[in-house]
Amino acid sequence: MIIRLFLLIFLGLSCSVQAQPKLAVLDFELKDMTLAPGIKTEVERTAAIKPMLETQLQQAGFSIIPVSKERQQFMDSGVGYLFNHHDVAAQLARANNADFILVGRLHKPSFLFSYLIVQLVEAKSGKLSERWVVEVKGPQKKLTSKGVESLVVKINAFFNDYNAPENKVFNTN
């Protein structure tokens, strides 16, 4: 609990210096490669990731732009489509006035572990800006929450670097 509080204070302080971009977060998709795919508890676990991520990003100072489930489904032509087509994910971000969109997947190759995979797509360019992978060992909600915390730390670090003055391009002409 103390570590979590420290983490949130650290994230909040490091975010307060720069205005954070507006982020849209899509529902995570489940890519279950086990011998018994689509178990109800895994489907529920996958559905719980987006709200966990949005809450922790808001606590870290990010502005979260909602994307309706209907709009996401309309733009999604099938499993993995938005994950693999950054240009279409960027259209969805622009339609919702977000600067970036987070497209996520819970990849489960085994009953023992899974991977939270998040791709950050820039709305303006439609390009993949960053990709993060966090391993989660075990199906427990507490472990998934810890994985989401790790993602938020990585996302925050990316934007701290992204907003750093040395990464800004100035026109000297």
Image (cartoon, rainbow, N blue to C red):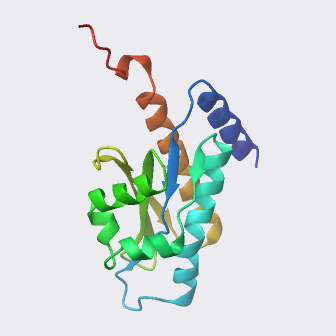
Task: Tell me where residue 4 appears, x and y as whole percent.
Answer: 70, 46
35 and 98: which one is in front? Answer: 98
**Quadrant assignment for the C terminus:** top left
95 relative to 145 in the view: left or right: left
Q: Residue furthest top?
A: 173
| Residue at x 60%, y 56% (from the top left corner) | 54
In the foreground, 29 or 125: 125
| Depth order, front residue of 68/148 | 68
Query: Where residue 64 appears, x then y in whole percent?
Result: 58, 51
Q: Residue at x 60, y 71 (%)?
A: 48
Which of the 4 image quarters holds residue 116? bottom left
Picture residue at 43% right of the left edge, 29% below the top? 161
In the rendered structure, the answer to whether residue 85 lies left or right of residue 47 reads left
Q: Is residue 155 visible?
A: yes
- Frontmost residue, 13 versus 173: 173
Q: Quadrant of residue 162?
A: top left
Reply above or below: 28 against 117. Answer: below
Tell me the residue at 55%/35% (across/down).
20
From this view, report whether residue 156 is shown above or below residue 68: above
Q: Is residue 21 above or below residue 69?
A: above
Q: Is residue 29 visible?
A: no
| Extreme-left residue of the structure | 173
The quadrant where residue 11 appears: top right
Task: Where is residue 13? Give x, y as percent.
Answer: 66, 29
Can you give x and y, in whole percent of width and height, for residue 28 in the image?
47, 69
Count how many numbered circles sit on residues in the image.
0
